[in-house]
Image (cartoon, rainbow, N blue to C red):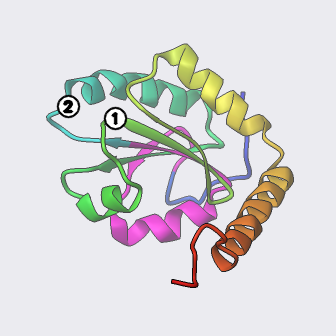
Amino acid sequence: MTTAPEQSSAHPPGAVIDLAAEDFATTLPTHPFAIVDFWAPWCAPCRAFAPVFAAAATRHPGVLFAKVNTEEQQELAGHFNIRSIPTLMVFREGIVVFSQAGALNSSALEQALSAAGALDMKQVRRELDTEASQEAVEGTFDCSRDSSR
């Protein structure tokens, strides 16, 4: 079972909460491990996935389970480039470590949570820092353009 530090009393362990744009930025940083389901009420696969998601929330009380209604939160869905629903995103320490469109079955969801929970976040941050440094260097020294023209 995946565990994390205690959650805020505003979000009881094992519960699935609804997130809106105005509380997304204040809620996620307070949880070292969170999974967000981007969904819509008209989406049949989203509705079929809801009980799987809720059951996982009860099995992982240390993880924040949240849902974002993409119909009501279009700006938030756009920010995360949601193109298909359902889309699941797993956040560790505020970093997206897993993102997948499509409803997962219970075992696939458990595998994703287990893999995300096993990540060495210091190593993830080092890799992100290296990528950012490399992108900065590539952007600064773009040798693919001929500046003499």
- Vertical position of residue 22 compared to residue 103: above or below: below
- Vertical position of residue 35 compared to residue 125: above or below: above
- The 10 Å Cα crowd at callout 2, few under 14, some 14 to 19, many 20 or more, is few
Left-right relation of 95 to 53: right
List the single residue furthest toward the left: 42
Q: Which residues are magenta?
A: 12-37
For the N terminus, the image quarter is top right
Q: Find out whether the residues at labels 2 and 1 contact each other: C-beta distance under 8 Å.
A: yes
Residue 86 is marked as: 1
Q: CA distance from mark 2 to mark 1?
A: 8 Å
Residue 28 is marked as: none
List the single residue furthest toward the bottom: 148
- Vertical position of residue 1 compared to residue 14: above or below: above
Q: Which residue occupies 20% across, 24% down? A: 44
Q: Picture coordinates of residue 128 (x, y %)?
A: 73, 59
Q: Amino acid under label 2? A: Cys
Q: Picture coordinates of residue 21 (x, y %)?
A: 35, 66
Residue at the spot of label 2: 43
Is 32 inside the magenta-drawn segment? yes
